[in-house]
Amino acid sequence: MRQSQSTSSASTDFTSRPESGWMMRHVSAEGETQLRLIPYIMEDGTEQPQLIDPALAGTSPKAVLSETFTEYETLHFAGQNKYSFITEPNTPIVGPTPAMLMWATLRNYRKQHRKECPDLWYNWFERNIDGRKTEAFSKPRPCLYARCIIFRLGGKDVTDKFEHPIALFPCVIKLSQSSSADEMIKGLTQPLDPNKPLSIENSVFGDVTSCSNGKLLRITPENRMNPVLKRNQLYYSVSVCKEIPSYPISIEMVKNVNKPWTSILNVNSIEWIIERLAETFSSDAVYFALKDSPYGRYIPSHIEKEGRRSAPVTHPNVVSMNIPGTYDEPDLRYPEPVQAHPLPPAMPKPMVPPHQVLPKPTMAPITPVAPVSTQVSAPRPLTDKNVKPTSAMVPPPPPPSMPNPGPINPQVSNTPITEEEMRKRLADAQEQLKKLFSESQN
């Protein structure tokens, strides 16, 4: 079975909300990134501490971090359209996300049914085709997001069109590589003196978020020997800029752009995520992977119609035999569906000023500055209707409206699945697991 696939050199990033006024950037393998983290401002107008409850760092380091940070499973540069988007829906179902389930199902089908597997699907998981690196369907992974000001990106100082040094603000940096996220978390939650309790002062980085004393950070790409693969691999180290003791900023400047993460990041519905998967991969692959899962009822009707017409008949019976909850191999056995708690209501949206110029870091502390309007390189669209976008302002297209979900499953009725039916399905899945395990032993 052969299918054609058009290629696209451009990529589209859906991870942030354009109307928020916040820019989204990711660390680059081309060179050093230099940034200054900024704090989250609480409702009482004060800064949230860098560490919320240091005593919990030993059991859950991420849980002690302030709202300067957040984490979501994210897919990067996926498919022919090279989409990047958050794959955790805003009303989640317990179990793997739609993207993770699709990735694992197609990967398993590729191994079990090579002759029936469409070439297009097979090539999504190939690392090289004719000497060209592809891997269009990489595994969705946790991504650490952080509020910041960026002075240097990809080894180059941030400048305006006249080559004047400026800063990207307000900005979110994506730490999608596990090494960069791990290094950041260790620096924030590992005690500098292991004989003393963890605190902001007794951490490897020290104070890096407060407006008055926060330090600059460097994220540097470097090749290190991977002891398992026995070859060099790209890692990202995170360290404090020791040349500059601190970089004070105005708290009023931060207050003017302060927003909760729910207003900055684009966390969307299950239907929206399925639409993006179908756009950048294919409708038949989405339908094939999700039709018999709890996400089957959320497949839009037009995707279901296309999928039923061209998807293979054979199904891989995907049941993970690995430890549930790991990102090495996701657990694909669904428990009984539960109603997830809704996201907390968003704070009232403050007025977002134009992007602001900050002085380039020097070897001495810099006096706090007031925000000044300017243009920055490749900004996201502003909420100020009087600002005319330039040719550099190229936002991702807005999410299209979602059609009503189609029927639950073409093989079953449209009535809701009862608890008894769900338990029966789980029992069948367990029998399949035992059968697969028994066959693998033989």
Image: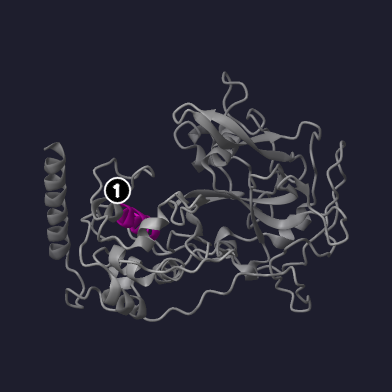
Quadrant in the rendering for residue 388: bottom right
**Residue 150 falls within the magenta-colored stretch:** no
Q: Is residue 349 above or below residue 134?
A: below
Residue density around tag 1, few if under 14, some if 14–19, many if 20 or more, within 10 Å:
many
Query: Looking at the image, can residue 348 be seen?
Result: no
Q: Position of residue 430 (x, y in %)?
A: 15, 50
Q: Foreground residue, 5 or 410? A: 5
The answer to whether 16 is drawn above or below residue 128 in the figure is below
Name the side, left or right, on which 311 lies relative to 376. left
Helix or strand or loop: what does disc 1 sit on? loop
Q: Quadrant of the C terminus?
A: top left
Q: Amino acid at mark 1?
A: Asp
Q: 115 left or right of 171? A: left
Q: Quadrant of residue 350?
A: bottom right
Way the structure is coloured: one colour
Res 37 visible: yes
The residue to which callout 1 is attached is 331
Residue 425 placement (x, y as % from top left): 15, 60
The answer to whether residue 398 is above or below residue 258 is: below
Residue 233 position, x and y percent, is: 54, 35
Query: Does the magenta run of residues contain 95?
Result: yes
What span is colored magenta in the figure?
94-107
Q: How many marks?
A: 1
* Quadrant into which the N terminus falls: bottom left
Of 235 and 6, nearer the camera is: 6
Q: Is residue 296 left or right of residue 328?
A: left
> In the current view of this chain or complex, which residue is farthest to the front?
130
Which residue appears at 57% of the width and 37% of the height? 234
* Residue at the top extreme of this rendering: 195
Q: Please state the horizontal and vertical placement of residue 397, each as a whole percent of the image.
A: 58, 73
Could you tell me what secondary structure mostly forms the magenta stretch?
A: helix
